[in-house]
Image (spheres, helix red, strand yellow):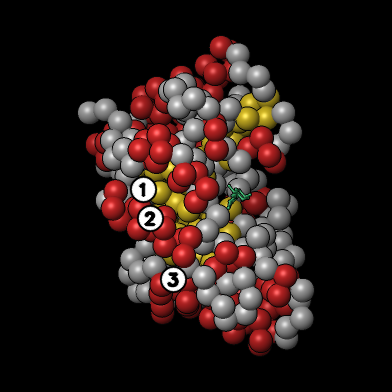
Amino acid sequence: VSGLAKLAKAAGKKYFGTATDNPELNDAPYVEKLGDLHDFNQITPGNSMKWDATEPSRGNFQFANADVIVNLARKNKQILRGHTCVWHSQLPQWVTAGNFTKSALQEIVKTHTRKVVSHFKGKIWDVVNEPFNDDGTFRESVFYTTIGPEYIAIALKAARKADPHAKLYINDYNIDGPGAKSDAMYNLVKSLKEQGVPIDGIGVQAHLIAGIVPDSFQANLERFASLGVDVALTELDIRFTLPPTPAKLEQQRRDYQNVIAACKAVKRCVGVTIWDWTDKYSWIPSVFPDQGAALPWDEGFVKKPAYDGIANGW
Ligand code: XIL
């Protein structure tokens, strides 16, 4: 068996996949590789399902860009992860302005989640994205400050109602090892389950740094899974300070291998998504100055040592 998705399936996982984004779909060689089922049997839209894209003004739902990616996934026979219904970022001004009462914003969250999830049936969804601060307190988004932490249950219930077959996740970053933020995710999902709120999985974004991946990565996944939910690595990339050197690429290869091996070892780790597959379209350099080269293919679509790390990890 060869190919990252084929190897993931041979290891008993549902998928290995990648994020993509609409502007990249004008790059024909990129699109051809994106559709290679040996390496990718799952895709995630990097931007086009976010609130600013899907409901730019109230009640005005726009699905054209997201539909392009969903249709591409269907054509390629790839699983689709929906990303994301309720998030503090890439929110349109009409929501962030904070001009709504608690009950009005509750209705807005319900309607938005229902419309988006029911437009794309049968998907896996990051219903709520990044609800926590790094210290484990709830992030003071407009949703939290206006509604309180129950905005999370409101969104999850609306998603379940909109599509009983969808898999519903809460997704966050810096929950790769033990710590306050991982504890907060653990406690939130535990309490949601105790209350009977629908929740199927925890998404570990896994935006990692070469050389400092937590040793306890696997134990941390296992702990989440022990709650009786699936776990997935939803946005994996492993960055370092540019430029690449053989030593940095080798470190990155080892880190990819360890992270994949951790998912392999955890029964309820259902799949892994990298946050795009080529350094040409990685989000890292635009957000982390001097950092990059975080993905398994370089800017010229040539496989890096990281590719072999992933293959060996499976
Ligand atoms: C990123 C996209 O990749 C960029 O194109 C965009 O400019 C900003 O958002 N965590 C998430 C993703 O959940 O939605 C983010 O995606 C990366 C961090």
**Mark 1 falls on what kind of element?**
strand
How far across and down, in percent of the image, does residue 143 sit?
68, 72
How far across and down, in percent of the image, does residue 179 sit?
65, 46
Above or below — where is 285 with respect to 148? above
Foreground: 47 or 200?
47
Cα separation between marks 3 and 2: 12 Å
Asked whether residue 23 appears in the rendered view, the answer is: yes
Q: Which residue is drawn at 48% across and 60% down?
A: 65
Please give the residue where the numbered disc 3 appears in the rendered image. 117
Q: Residue at x 53, y 81 (%)?
A: 111
Query: Which quarter of the figure is the C terminus placed in?
Result: top left
Please give the residue where the numbered disc 2 appears in the rendered image. 80
Please give the residue where the numbered disc 1 appears in the rendered image. 42
Foreground: 22 or 169?
22
- Label 2 CB less than 8 angstroms from ligand 1: no
Query: Is mark 2 in CB contact (under 8 Å) with mark 1?
Result: yes
Q: Residue flagged by tag 3: what amino acid is it?
A: Val
